[in-house]
Amino acid sequence: MDITGNSKDSLDFNIAVIASPVNSNRGTERRVWGFRKSITGQLDYTGKLDSSMSFEGWQILEGSPFYSPSYYTYLSPGLACSFEIAVHPDCILDSAGMFSYLTHIGPLIMAVDENDGLLAAEIFSRRSGIFMKNASLTLYLIKNVAVSGLFSWVFGRFGDTAEFLSFYKAGSMFDSSCTDTACVFFEAAKDELLPEPQKEDVEEMFIRYFKGRKEVQLTMGLVGQRFRNWQDGLEFLDSVIKIQTGDDFQSASTKMKDAKRDFLGSLSVCAQAEPSNNYDPNAIEVFVDDIEAKIAGNTGRIKAGYLRASGAAVIRMSRPLRFNYNAQLVRIGNLQEGRTGIVIKITV
């Protein structure tokens, strides 16, 4: 069953994971996904549910967020959620492992629902031990973003991928006890990627995959940001907002939060190839609205960073005649660059 499939009307579930938007006045509806604990104690996914469904009389448990909210400087409205788990009165959660799984799985499903492969991989990496206690279900849940998540994890950041590269080259058989993020996402992506490790390396596999599709949507974190001044604008924005909100702490904090979110959400992004780059002819540079200029009423983007060189090379070799890519800002804050790390959604 497709995780983004049709709503369920029949009560074929006894557990629901609920994602409620933090800012309900921003036009984002809550999302609900159903699970069923069978008589034998197995947990199954039953599909996406009607968002207006009531759970009066059910036991409501607090879910774990995907990270401390303070970690992210900006989250797009679809990602800014709180999580709850509704348990039917007749359903008994007598397994600590299942309890832990359910209280953590919401953010992972939400990342899949938002088609954010990088975030799904980041969330998985933080709780891989919990998620792989129910390996087959987790592989099923991440399947829709497994390809993009794997690419972003391996080619979009600086991290240790030695275990995965060795696993791929050897054509190893997957073991459900594995918790390596890249290996798990690769296993979930095999049906789409159709890997042939005897004939091609990982880069060649993705080049073939991209060439075989009209377009692919990826979430990618930027690198090289420390050498750019775009991030200085974030501090300038904070200082301006604090001055404008006055001394009433409660009112000011709400105003500041709303103003900052709306302003950052309005920033435009441009991603384009840079074939004239003397160091890397495959470079893909990313421009974002200049924050200080926009506050002053001016327009114009400034360079905010690059896609990582290895990922850009795969994209450029897949699309050698394409120089511009549709892109948008999805969040500020990631594993690689911390609270100021820029993450974009890019169509290649």
Image: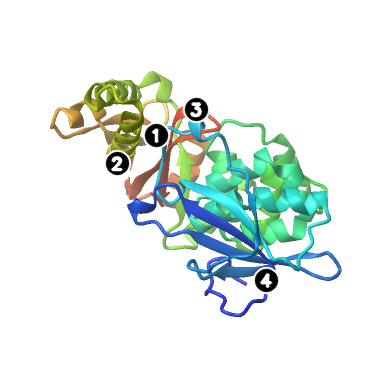
Label 1, residues with CA under 10 Å away: few <14, some 14-19, many ≥20: some
Q: Dot 3 corresponds to which residue?
A: 337
Residue at 44%, 34% (x, y): give it. Answer: 222
Q: Quadrant of the N terminus?
A: bottom right
Rounded to the nearest angstrom, the CA distance separating label 3 from label 2 is 22 Å
The Cα–Cα distance between marks 4 and 3, rounded to whole angstroms, is: 40 Å
Q: Which residue is mark 4?
A: 13
Mark 2 falls on what kind of element? helix
Q: Secondary structure at mark 3?
A: loop
Question: Which label sits in the foreground, 3 or 2?
Answer: 2
Label 3 and label 1: CA atoms lie apart by: 24 Å
Badge 2 or badge 1: first in the primary sequence: 2
Residue 47, by quadrant, is bottom right
Residue sitting at the far right? 40
Q: Nearer the observer, disc 4 or disc 3?
A: 4
Q: Residue furthest bottom?
A: 10
Disc 1 vs disc 4: Cβ atoms closer than 8 Å?
no
